[in-house]
Image: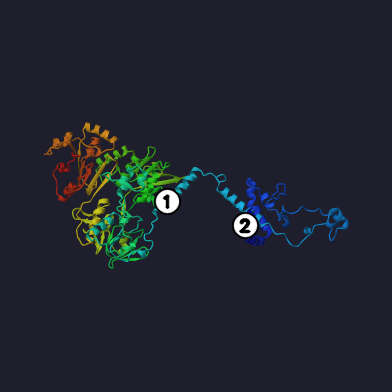
Amino acid sequence: MLRKARIGPSKMLSYGRVIGRLPKLTRHSHANHFCRPLKYVGIVSVHNLWYSSSSNDKKIYRAPGTTIKPEECVPESTYSKPKRPVPFCESQPNASCPPSCYEVCGKPDDSEKPSDKKPPPQHWKILATLLIAGVTLYAISSSSWFSTKKSDSQKAVSKSKKDEKKRKRALDKIKTPPTSNLIPSEIPYLLIGGGTAAFSAFRSIKSRDPRAKVLVISDEGDLPYMRPPLSKELWYNRDRKTTAQLLFKQWNGAQRSVFYEPPEFYTQIKSLSNSEKGGVSVATGWRVKKIDVPNKLVILDDGYQIKYDKCLIATGASPKNLPVFETMQDELKEKIITFRTKHDFLYLEDIVHNPKCKNVVIIGGGFLGSELACSLARNLSGDKKVYQVYKEKFIMDQVLPQYLSEWATKKAISEGVQCISSSEVEDYSYKNGKLSLVLSDNQIVDADQVIVAVGVEPNTDLAHVSQLETDHEIGGFLVNAELEARSNLWVAGDAACFYDVKLGRRRVEHHDHAVVSGRLAGENMTGARKPYLHQSMFWSDLGPEVGYEAIGIVDSSLPTVGVFVKSSESDNKVQSVRNTHETTQVSDKKNSRSSPQGDAKSESDDTKVCRDDDPKPADKPEVYDDFGKGVVFYLRDDIVVGIVLWNIFNRMPVARQVLARGTKYDDLNEVAKLFTIHDD
């Protein structure tokens, strides 16, 4: 049946020719070697398959490696006739049997006479054996019966490698378009960088020049998106399916994506040059290695040149790492990460929800580190620990006055953060897959995941090769008040070191500054010639009960005056109830009235004024809840240069007016009344 169903006559002849050319000894020894394991496991009888279909046909066992005669390898056919007994007279050399012997033994058959012609080999048996053996070996290899069970450590290593490959694939920047010759060689508006500043710039350009053709070149592999939700709102959502789509709820309750525009908004690069209506195209995964400013040329990493009329540098900033981690081995690069991009968020969100991840360590006490620590501690399960290690005495110590940073630290601890102050990471150890951090006070902290959040540095790699000037103290490309670095070349966002006509030369690393500076650069690229007069703001959240907005120069090294609403006993009771329902605390207006004259009585009864040169509130705050709501003024030469609105919102226009006046104030308690801090 097998011969008729699977092998035709023509194929039989071909197989016979091929196999017939092989030496018998080689062919049979290979068959024995191939099938011997099957014989031992008892799945199939090689003896029956290869030599005979009769179970009674016993063969002498020979040890592996025994040399045998060629004739011993030839199988006996089960279809051959029984052997005739050979008479003694024929067994002698050159002998013949007499006629009387034929009468006794019978006349021999002509077919039994010796012939020089060899019988045709049974090729179908060989092929059938090979086929069955191959199928059997495949079944054995795929069966878990013969496979060694992986230990938990091996499974963990395997999963870790898969996660690492997944992350590497995410970080691999796929170039779009795949080749540079698909990118226009000439473009009116060229933007280098694909972040918030670039997005704000091309929106401004298109609003003033609707038919403008704008090309964005980004070394990231994604379309422009916003970064603040990566450390704030995205962590508040416990629906991981929604979070995986990078969707979050805004302050008004509406849901939106971190991406500014859907892919359909952008014009395909191949159609940009011929588009009559203009458009915006984004080339992702491409890096600009040089700008030829006099000739208005941009050179890509593969040498391709693009000629522009107006160009904007919006390269942003990159996160810093600690020197102790710069030479770490490759297997630790997934356990110790910085946090900047959406890929960092997706990776961290997946890791911290892994049941094996018990200890998360965040290094840094600034904006990003404090936001991540509070968000993770509040949203992770109770069996996980979140540590925050920072070199300062309290979190946000470089921004807030000491009494307020201490209050914020206690709030972070109440959220579940394990704060380790006045410590730095000096070394680490990695043994048997376990990572431990060695701190400056010889304290050892075990870590399953480490996030380094110690600030950023501007991306100014283009400065040297393009002969552009940078600021050696605060970093960034030097630009004038109109954000122009050279003729037809502007800089916006984190990478711009601009001249503030009110506060002097500055570099700001916040979202609102990227929006405002990008918008102004876009306007100036279309001929507006406007100076940068806007005071950008920033905001931060330390859990759902503490949020603040700030504007201007906010530096704890400056003298500060803080005006806070005092809490009464009834407020404390309301606060404890509302903490349970995750709402922001409010003050009781009846117990915190302000006197129009701002006399000493009203100041002590209704509000609390804290100055940084007053050691009493700085070293030991009188009442912990006194700093739940208020305004902090930062002074330089007795002029307000910065303002923090602590748990007070929608007052930023008033703060901008105060900064714009640039005057000295005799009583900042009166200025605080402009913010109507009792109305919320």
Secondary structure type for disc 2: loop
Amino acid type of the residue that numbered disc 1 sits on in the rendered structure? Lys
Nearer to me, 187 or 314: 187
Mark 1 or mark 2: name the one nearer the start of the chain. Answer: 2
Look at the image and tell me in which quarter the C terminus lies: top left
Nearer to me, 609 or 671: 671
Nearer to me, 81 or 649: 81
Q: How is this picture coloured?
A: rainbow
Structural crowding at the residue carrying mark 2, measured as other residues with C-alpha within 10 Å and reported as few (<14), some (14–19) or many (≥20): some
Q: Give the CA distance from mark 1 to mark 2.
A: 47 Å
Residue 285 in the image: above or below residue 447? below
Name the residue located 34 percent from the left edge and 48 percent from the top edge.
246
- Is residue 234 shown to the viewer in this render? yes
Name the residue located 84 percent from the left edge and 61 percent from the top edge.
94
Amino acid type of the residue that numbered disc 2 sits on in the rendered structure? Ile
- Determine whether, in the image, residue 538 is placed left or right of residue 162: left
- Determine whether, in the image, residue 543 is placed left or right of residue 53: left
Mark 1, residue position = 166
- Determine whether, in the image, residue 254 is placed left or right of residue 92: left
Residue 679 in the image: above or below residue 339? above
Structural crowding at the residue carrying mark 1, measured as other residues with C-alpha within 10 Å and reported as few (<14), some (14–19) or many (≥20): few
Expressed as whole percent of the image width and height from the top left, the position of residue 45 reads 66, 48
Expressed as whole percent of the image width and height from the top left, the position of residue 49 reads 66, 50
Expressed as whole percent of the image width and height from the top left, the position of residue 364 reads 33, 46
- Which circle marks residue 7 in the picture? 2
Expressed as whole percent of the image width and height from the top left, the position of residue 488 reads 25, 64
Q: How many callouts does the rendering have?
A: 2
Nearer to me, 127 or 259: 127
Name the residue located 72 percent from the left edge and 54 percent from the top edge.
77
Secondary structure type for disc 1: helix
